[in-house]
Image: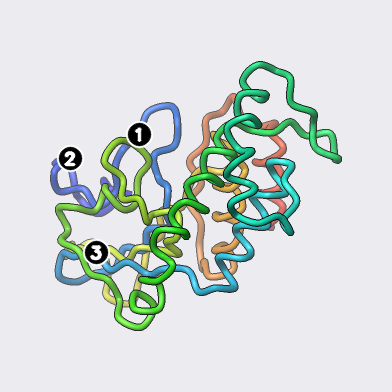
């Protein structure tokens, strides 16, 4: 995407390049315009959907309180890391990163839920230089990122027509199932897809599901 936009200098690139693990944590919508970042947070119903999906993926009862889940999360994570965790009802193994993301989501909600109505009403804007803090995994990521629905990145490239928008989506089936879920939520908005895939993963179930969605 960066090279399509002729953004060769890493300091100037709207999307961070990664090697191996996926780096994108939030849906990034790139539009032609003044360089900036607009942060769009999840409405209550979208938060509830993400919470339920993560609870299902980590073996927690979605009806449990946030505090109860947070109290049990560290032990569940330790069980997964030691191999002692029971598989999910469908036979799938719990992924370590799904527990980490669930903890981050519930912790962010506890801390920032009082800010969400204001952020939903008045879009939070940040400078272009701070974009990786909001759309990528890693050190320095903003604590409220799990509550993001998408980030709109303005980029003034002549290679990007004003009527075209480009999306960078989290990689499916990488470290967590929630990245696949997030990607599939946005596919209906797409008019065209470029899928970059490691050829060794062509047989992955997550990839098969994605191809089914695209067809």
Nearer to me, 6 or 135: 135
Q: Is residue 214 at least partly visible in the picture? A: no
* Mark 2 Cα-neighbour bin, 10 Å: few <14, some 14–19, many ≥20: few
Q: CA distance from mark 1 to mark 3?
A: 20 Å
Distance in Å between CA atoms under marks 2 and 1: 11 Å
Quarter the C terminus occupies: bottom right
Q: Tell me residue 169's x, y (percent).
A: 46, 52
Q: Which mark is residue 18?
A: 1
Q: Are marks 2 and 1 in contact (CB under 8 Å)?
A: no
> Disc 3 designates what residue?
37
Mark 2 or mark 3, which is nearer the start of the sequence? Answer: 2
Query: Residue 163: x, y in percent?
Result: 33, 77
Structural distance between the alpha carbons of marks 3 and 2 = 17 Å
The residue under the point 52% across, 30% down is 198
With 90 as the anchor, is 191 left or right in this view?
Answer: left
Q: Which mark is residue 55?
A: none
Q: Is residue 189 above or below residue 177?
A: below
* Residue located beneath label 2 in the image: 10
Q: Quadrant of residue 149?
A: bottom left
| Cβ atoms at labels 1 and 3 below 8 Å apart | no
In the displayed structure, 107 sits above or below 58; it is below
Q: Nearer the viewer, residue 183 or 88?
A: 88
Residue at 79 percent across and 31 percent down: it is 87
Q: Is residue 49 above or below residue 118?
A: above
Residue 56 horizontal side relative to residue 125, left or right: right
Element type where label 1 sits in the image: loop
Colour mode of the rendering: rainbow
Q: Is residue 176 above or below residue 79?
A: below
């Amino acid at each position: 995407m960066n090279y399509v936009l002729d953004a060769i200098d890493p300091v100037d690139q709207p999307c961070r390049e990664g090697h191996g693990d996926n780096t994108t944590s939030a849906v990034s919508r790139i539009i032609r315009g003044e360089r900036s970042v607009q942060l769009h947070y999840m409405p209550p119903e979208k938060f509830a959907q993400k919470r339920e999906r993560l609870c299902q993926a980590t073996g927690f009862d979605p009806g449990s309180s946030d505090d109860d889940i947070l109290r049990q999360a560290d032990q569940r994570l330790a069980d997964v890391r030691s191999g002692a965790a029971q598989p999910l009802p469908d036979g799938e193994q719990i992924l370590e990163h799904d527990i980490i993301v669930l903890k981050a989501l519930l912790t962010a909600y506890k801390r920032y839920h009082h800010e969400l109505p204001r952020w939903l009403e008045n879009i939070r804007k940040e400078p272009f230089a701070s974009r990786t803090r909001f759309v990528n995994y890693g050190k320095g990521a903003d604590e409220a990122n799990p509550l993001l629905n998408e980030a709109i990145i303005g980029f003034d490239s002549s290679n990007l027509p004003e009527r075209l928008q480009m999306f960078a989506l989290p990689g499916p089936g990488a470290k967590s199932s929630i990245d696949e879920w997030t990607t599939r939520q946005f596919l209906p908005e797409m008019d065209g897809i470029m899928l970059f895939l490691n050829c060794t993963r062509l047989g992955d179930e997550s990839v098969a599901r994605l191809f089914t969605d695209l067809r």
